[in-house]
Each structure stands twice: as structure tokens, then as C-alpha cells.
Image (cartoon, rainbow, N blue to C red):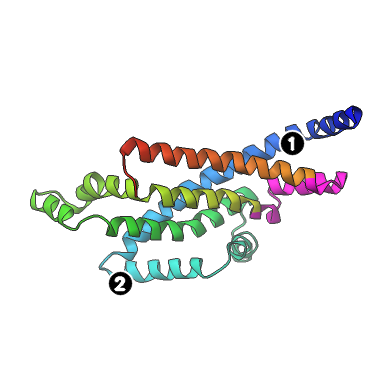
Amino acid sequence: MIGTALDYLQGFAAYMPGYASAFMIAVEVAAVTIVISWLCGLVGVLAKLSRYPALRYPAEFYIWFIRGTPQLVQVFLVYFGLPQVGLNLDPFVAGAIALGVGSGAYVAEIFRSGLLAIPKGQPESAHALGMGNALTFRRIVFPQMIRIVVPALTNEAINTLKNTSLLSTITIMELTLYTQAVIASTFRPFEFYIIVSVLYLAITTILTQFAKWYERRYALYL
């Protein structure tokens, strides 16, 4: 029994460097994707709430299209579709853009809910004091909106991290694709799927704890 257990541990240890590399790739993709999604979400919500149809209609179409189509199809559309119009992207770049733009539509709706939760009297008071729209948004609206949307934003970041597993379909050697390669050579799916589950749980738990810390810091309980 002891010998068998040692054999299992040695077998796992041989794949740990590969898992460490795949884990870092997943974290890097998720970090870039989250930044892109926040930028797309901010631009999307400001355009959707704009009084100018030229901004509002494209933003509404973007959110409608993204929320109505599967994320995997969006990944394929960017990675396999753009080369047909002459735009060839590295798998990492294509995957980050596809996931970031896709998540951005959901982030836009999260930001919109945060903006609508802020009393209208606050921006109006800022305007009465002579503050312009940009200054009012930066100093009055945006800080409050971020505090309100942190829980929902964290949930979306966790979903984005888990969706990096979709990028195994476009040859990015993240956790899922590496696990599939290991299983193909060892024929031991149960053990290695447990390992990849634990790794995903570790980083999603870190994100969740960060959100809880942020809420406690600002004493905002929703």
C-alpha cells in the first residue's frame, strides 16, 4: 500500500512543473481579459446611457449580441473568423480579446445597475457647484458605483477565470488543455481532473476573499 501511494505521488510530482506553467498562463489570460472587460464595460455603459443615438444604438447591439450568443462561439469568431478578413491574431491575444469583449457586455450591465443605484440628486448637486460631467463622474459617481458593484464584479471575474478553459479549443496550453494532454498519456482522468479543480478553486477563493475584504474595508453591505 505504501509503495503504491509513493508511486502515485511520484507520478503526480512529474507533472507539477507543467501544471505550474499552465496555471500561470491561465492567470495571465484571466488578468488581461478582466482589464479588457472592465474597459469595454465602462465604455459600453456610458454609450448605452448616452443621449446620442449614434453611441446608444451600437452599445445596445453589442450588449444584445454578446449576451445572446455562447462564449465559445465568440472565441471561434475571433480566432477563426478574423483571419478571413486578413487579421491574424496570436491565440493568446485572440482568446483574451474574445473573452474580454464577451465579458464586457455583462460588466456594462453591472456598471449600469451601480449607476442607477446612485441618487440623482448627487450629480445634480455637483453640477450646481460648477463641476462638469467628467469631473462629476470621476469624483462623485465612479467611486460610489465601484463600491456598489464589487460583489457582482467579482462574480464576473470568477466566471471569466473559469471561461479561460474554453481557450483550450484554440491551442492555448492552460490548465484544461494541459490536463487533457496528461490524461491522454496516463489514462487517469479522475486524479488529474481533481487536481485541475483544486487549482481553479484556489484562485477563485482568492478572488472571493478579496471581494469580502473590500466590502469590509468600506463597510458597505448590500
The quadrant where residue 5 appears = top right
- Name the amino acid type tagged 2: Pro
**Drawn side of residue 178 relative to residue 130, left or right:** right
Viewer can see residue 186:
yes
**Drawn side of residue 147 relative to residue 84, left or right:** left
Q: Determine which residue is flagged by label 1.
A: 18
The local secondary structure at tag 2 comes to helix
Q: Determine which residue is flagged by label 2.
A: 53
The quadrant where residue 13 appears = top right
Q: Position of residue 165 (x, y in %)?
A: 65, 51
Q: Position of residue 48 (x, y in %)?
A: 34, 65
Q: Position of residue 31 (x, y in %)?
A: 52, 43
The local secondary structure at tag 1 comes to helix
**Residue 183 inside the magenta-drawn segment:** yes
Q: Are marks 2 and 1 in contact (CB under 8 Å)?
A: no
The residue nearer to you, when weighing 50 against 195, is: 195
- Looking at the image, the residue that sits furthest to the front is 1
The residue nearer to you, when weighing 53 against 195, is: 195
- Name the amino acid type tagged 1: Gly
Residues in magenta, as a range: 166-190
Q: Is residue 106 above or below residue 26?
A: below
Q: Residue at x 70, y 48 (%)?
A: 176
Q: Residue at x 39, y 69 (%)?
A: 60
Rounded to the nearest angstrom, the CA distance separating label 2 from label 1 is 50 Å
Residue mark closest to the camera, 2 vs 1: 1
